Amino acid sequence: MLSTGEGKPKNSDQRTTLFKRALDKVYNLRGKSARVFFTELNEKYPSMFFSLNGFSDEITAKMGIKECMEHDMIIPYPVMVEK
């Protein structure tokens, strides 16, 4: 994070685009799209941050990430803004 102002960032209401996998969380996903998404996530980005644009099927990734976030398997990086 970089700031040219006072350095007091606030969470924005913009959509999050970067995520990271929580390595210490384990859960058996129920939805097929969530399992497909998580399998591809483990193959491409095992421990680094990622964007949904990097997946082969973005629609399946959007549906799958929802269930993963509900069970705290994915950590979203929020969009921060300042004055």
Image (cartoon, rainbow, N blue to C red):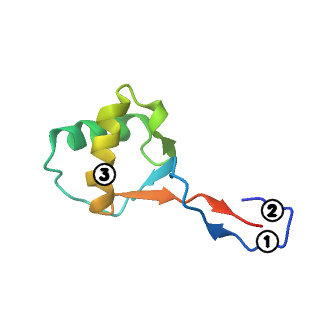
Q: Choose between 51 and 40: the one closer to the eye.
A: 51
Q: Amino acid at mark 1?
A: Gly
Helix, strand or loop status at disc 1: loop
| Label 2 vs 3, first from the N-terminus | 2
Q: Quadrant of residue 34?
A: top left
* CB within 8 Å, label 2 to label 1: yes
Q: Which residue is mark 3?
A: 66
Residue at the (21%, 58%) spot, across then down:
27
Question: Which labelled disc corresponds to residue 7?
Answer: 1
- Left or right: residue 79 compared with residue 19: right
Q: Give coordinates of residue 10: x percent, y percent.
A: 65, 70
Picture layout, residue 11 above or below residue 20: below
Q: Residue furthest left?
A: 30
* Residue type, label 3: Lys
Determine which residue is flagged by label 2: 3
Label drawn at residue 17: none
Q: Answer yes or no: do the residues labelled 3 and 1 have beta carbons within 8 Å?
A: no
Q: Quadrant of the C terminus?
A: bottom right
Mark 3 Cα-neighbour bin, 10 Å: few <14, some 14–19, many ≥20: some
Where is residue 80 shown, x and y percent of the image? 64, 62
CA gap between label 2 and label 3 equals: 31 Å
